[in-house]
Image (cartoon, rainbow, N blue to C red):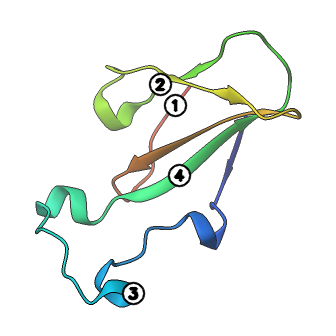
Amino acid sequence: GGFMTPPAYLLPRHPSASTGIDPPSAPDSLSHLVPTVFTWPYGGNQLFVTGAWDHWQSKHPMHHNGTEFAVFISLQPGRFQYK
């Protein structure tokens, strides 16, 4: 599997930078999320990612983009086990 930083155009921007309008306040737990992409270039039919960031509770479906499977997940900063 893989782990990489998403391209800059996929990173969240503060809405007031372009619109002058402040977004609604987000709880602290949501304001520091890091958009993270997981990739799998080894083939397959239906792939999912699960991890310790939510105690292995959710399965995130990966989407095939023609060359590999990938999924973006917003995570708290830190290191997590995943499979």
- Disc 4 target residue: 36
Image vertical order of residue 7 relative to residue 4, above or below: below
Determine whether label 1 and label 2 are within 8 Å by CB. Answer: yes
How many angstroms separate mark 3 from mark 4 (CA)? 24 Å
Work out whether mark 2 precedes mark 4 in sequence or the reverse, and give the earlier one.
4
Image vertical order of residue 13 relative to residue 41, above or below: below
Residue displayed at 39% across by 87% down: 18
How many angstroms separate mark 3 from mark 2 (CA)? 35 Å
Quadrant where the C terminus sits is top right
Q: Is residue 36 left or right of residue 12?
A: right
Q: Which mark is residue 50?
A: 2
How many angstroms separate mark 1 from mark 3 (CA)? 36 Å
User: Which of these two is toward me, 69 or 49?
Assistant: 69
How many angstroms separate mark 1 from mark 2 (CA)? 6 Å
Q: Is residue 81 left or right of residue 69?
A: left
Determine whether label 1 and label 3 are within 8 Å by CB. Answer: no
Q: Which mark is residue 18?
A: 3
Determine whether label 2 and label 4 are within 8 Å by CB. Answer: no
Q: In the displayed orientation, state which residue is furthest to the front.
A: 19
Q: Amino acid at mark 4?
A: Thr
Q: Is residue 13 left or right of residue 69?
A: left
Which callout, 1 or 2, points to the residue nearer the camera?
A: 2
Which callout, 1 or 3, points to the residue nearer the camera?
A: 3
Q: Which mark is residue 82?
A: 1
Work out whether mark 3 precedes mark 2 in sequence or the reverse, and give the earlier one.
3
Work out whether mark 1 precedes mark 2 in sequence or the reverse, and give the earlier one.
2
Determine whether label 3 and label 2 are within 8 Å by CB. Answer: no
Q: Amino acid at mark 1?
A: Tyr
